[in-house]
Image (cartoon, helix red, strand yellow):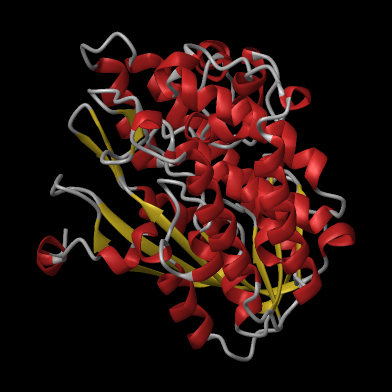
Amino acid sequence: MVPYVQKLKQRADYTQKFNATSGRHGWLRLTPAYSLKVVEEILDQNADAERVLDPFCGTGTTALSSISHGFDAVTTDINPFLVWLATAKTRRYSPQEIDDTLTAGAYALGLVESAACRADPPPIHQIGRWWGPTSLEFLCRLRSAIDRATQGAASNDLLKVAFCRTLIRLSNAAFNHQSMSFKQSQPMLALHTNLADTFRQDYERVCSGAAENIQGNSRAYVHDARKLCRETLGAFDLVITSPPYANRMSYIRELRPYMYWLGYLVEPQDAGEMDWEAIGGTWGVATSRLDGWQPFYGFTHSHLSDVSEAMQASENKNGVILANYVRKYFDDIFGHFISLRSVMRPGGRLHYIVGNSTFYGTVLETQEIYADIMRQNGFDDVEIKVIRKRNSKKELFEYAVSSTAGT
């Protein structure tokens, strides 16, 4: 490893923390989300681009940053909740729609006390770990009231975003680790919090962001990143994205409270099935099926083989399954780059923000494998640039892997 890399700092402005106070970017957090500052720096370096693609939507950071700077953008994801969120974040809202949302939010709070607004809680496993009885009752009534209080799609979506903010604020979820966890002590938040004021603050915050000026145009599609289609998506001269990392971080685990409350998940097995379809998914059945997994695209790489063998030889009982997880991850990523060729214009630029990983003391140099996958698929001028130190583990860094689409 280059010596100066070891001296890099954990730059908070290069993480999702930078997004928290940045208008629409701060509407909802997702722990693995990347910083809009990274996206904006890349956009500044590619000012002559016309259409920007993010094939791994996340919370819509790339799409929102792009249209805020006048670019046209398309973003895709296999998760319909993320596509909904990106659509809501990148939509233009008229002053009338924002006023209607503020009125509907106040009306919804007035309906919460109505007996007609009683609704059953979503089937989240051990839901009592998430919310105390008073908060849970309030959320059930509020969720029903929002649909009753809104008439237009814009107002309904904005209040649903605010509802998602409120349900997390009232929960016992903690975000002081790499992924979401639960606070050790679970205070009865309802005893210390005016629940109605919490939601009021959230929908006013969301409406403030909705008033921001949007210049470019954006579309979000439910689409498999391994099957990108030019007929559906069009052609692009710039890709800025941060795919799921090869570290068993499940987006479904992070998103499931939102997805259950908004109806994107109904049965517990739905989460595992969706994670199995996603690249890097590890939730439920997505783990159990790894035991019988076989490569589809046949991608091989010497470093990947070495890491896989080390994992299988480890004393950890999950070594074989995790080795299959890593192999499947890169086989899927290889398939993604095959399909990416069909939507890229000659000379178009690619920028992938990725992180390396460690498994049982063995470092997986993800950035090197991405660079080789790009070369194997005909992309030129491949470059790896280290961005920041990721956390307290000295081996972990975040990288930008870039290249140019060939003719």
Single out the residue that lies furthest toward the bottom: 48
* Foreground pick, 228 / 143: 143
Residue 45 in percent (x, y) is at 49, 86
Vertical position of residue 359 compared to residue 160: above or below: above
Residue 342 in percent (x, y) is at 77, 61
Residue 215 appears left or right of 303: right
Residue 400 appears left or right of 217: left
Residue 133 in percent (x, y) is at 47, 17
Residue positioned 53% across, 15% down in the render: 284
Count of numbered tags: 0
Vertical position of residue 102 compared to residue 133: above or below: below
Quadrant in which the C terminus is drawn: bottom right
* Foreground pick, 180 / 250: 180
Residue positioned 49% across, 29% down in the render: 253
Vertical position of residue 120 compared to residue 63: above or below: above
Quadrant in which the N terminus is drawn: bottom left
Residue positioned 12% across, 69% down in the render: 4
Residue 296 visible (yes or no): no
Vertical position of residue 225 compared to residue 123: above or below: below
* Foreground pick, 14 / 292: 14
Toward which corner of the image does residue 307 lie, by quadrant?
top left
Residue positioned 58% across, 30% down in the render: 139
Residue 164 visible (yes or no): yes
Residue 405 in percent (x, y) is at 63, 72
